[in-house]
Amino acid sequence: MMEFVDLDIVTITRCLYITCGVVWILSILRCLAYRHLANIVEKSRMQSCPDDELPAFTVIITSHNQSDCLKRHLPLIITQIYPNFEVLVVDMNSTDDSEKVLEQLEAEYPNLRHTFTPSTSRDISTQRLAITLGIKGASNPWIVLTQADCCPISHLWLRRLGESIKGHRSAEIALGYTRYKKAKGYTEQKMYFYRLWQQMKTLKYTPKHGIYRCDGTNMAYKKDLFLSHQGFASHSNLLMGATDIMVNQQSTKDNSVVCVHPEAIVEQQMPGHKHWVQDRLYFQESRRHFKNTWFYRMRSAASIILHALLMLTLIASITVAILNEEYVIAGVAASLWVIHTIIQGLSFNTTAKALNNQGYSHLRIGWFIHLLPFWHLRIWLQYTFGNKQKYRKKYI
């Protein structure tokens, strides 16, 4: 009987070691997949297009009490090196000096104009109304959406968007990359990492599966596509998530393209932590209206589960090996942990560098990835047990 028990323990131990090795290999492949977006960035550098073939753009900027942002960012957008474009600012009932700033800039730049949302609007969220007014008032067939707290890092931002569209004949949506401004403290580094991780996770699959989500800060969109789908009619009762739901429902692998050229990047001001959490809560509500989400959600869940399994099997293998005085196996398992951390950091930072993002230490990347399940769990719990009415338009 004792021999049977001893044999069973040995078998279980060996199965644990084998499982750890298999999970480690799968996790390494997951880490190497971080580099896929960097390869797309390199391919995008080779795109070019004559001026007369580039689409005409109307850049729509939504703003609310952001006069300082308009002063800083509008000149960088209006002076883009592009043959045919205009800039239309939609002011959402600002009470600061935004009107004065816009009038001063319009006197200086003839391709800038502005409009505003009426304060009496009741049947649609302010965000959706602002975008709708901007698109209907656009003079050109292509719309570029961004926000007042965003600015391109290059004067060739619009040109790179235009080249990505012309490189894909059936394109109706072009999704660009947006990063936060350089993070300073731990909280800002966490938010910076999370946004980079989210976009790395979704952008690389767009060419084969369409666009999963976007935040409306760096996106080109065909005006006719918006009008043919009646704009935001299917989700007009929601406060946020306008572009997320619109693009998810209308994007396909045939009409969507990503533009991740380093000169097409837009930089956004770092939000406060409370605003960051609120945006993620609103996304939980928006996601309920998404279509064809199984692939992205499955990949995201599989990635988090795989990383958790790796940590559990590595810790278990090291512990069991030490208890059994198998110090060589314990050393091998510890070495696998170190190698995984290095490869994960190198792959992640390769794509971050390609996208002109700040890098992270390998340990910091591993720490943040450990925390991802807890960040998701916190938001899910807040959303699940919170008041759902706050995500919807309140009618008077």
Image (cartoon, rainbow, N blue to C red):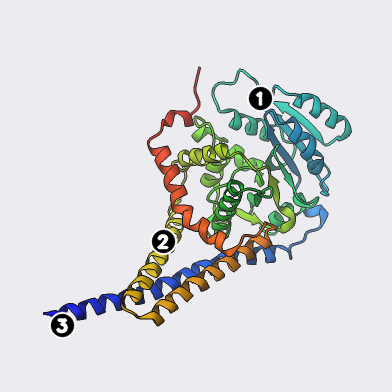
| Percent of width and height locating residue 53 | 78, 54
Q: CA distance from mark 1 to mark 2?
A: 48 Å
In-image side of 91 versus 294 (left or right):
right
Towards the viewer: 4 or 158:
4
- Mark toward the viewer: 3 or 2: 3
Q: CA distance from mark 3 to mark 2?
A: 34 Å
**Position of 339 relative to 257 (above/below):** below
The residue pinned by badge 1 equals: 117
Can residue 383 be seen here? The reply is: yes
Q: Secondary structure at mark 1?
A: loop
Which circle's residue, 1 or 3, is located before the other in the chain? 3
Which circle's residue, 3 or 2, is located before the other in the chain? 3
Q: Secondary structure at mark 3?
A: helix
In-image side of 233 versus 16 (left or right):
right
Towards the viewer: 362 or 346:
362
Residue 308: image tag: 2
Q: Amino acid at mark 2?
A: Ala
| Percent of width and height locating residue 90 | 70, 30
| Percent of width and height locating residue 364 | 56, 59
The residue pinned by badge 3 equals: 3
**Position of 77 relative to 361 (above/below):** above
Which circle's residue, 1 or 2, is located before the other in the chain? 1
Can residue 229 be seen here? The reply is: no
Q: Secondary structure at mark 2?
A: helix
In-image side of 281 versus 254 (left or right):
left
Q: CA distance from mark 1 to mark 3?
A: 81 Å
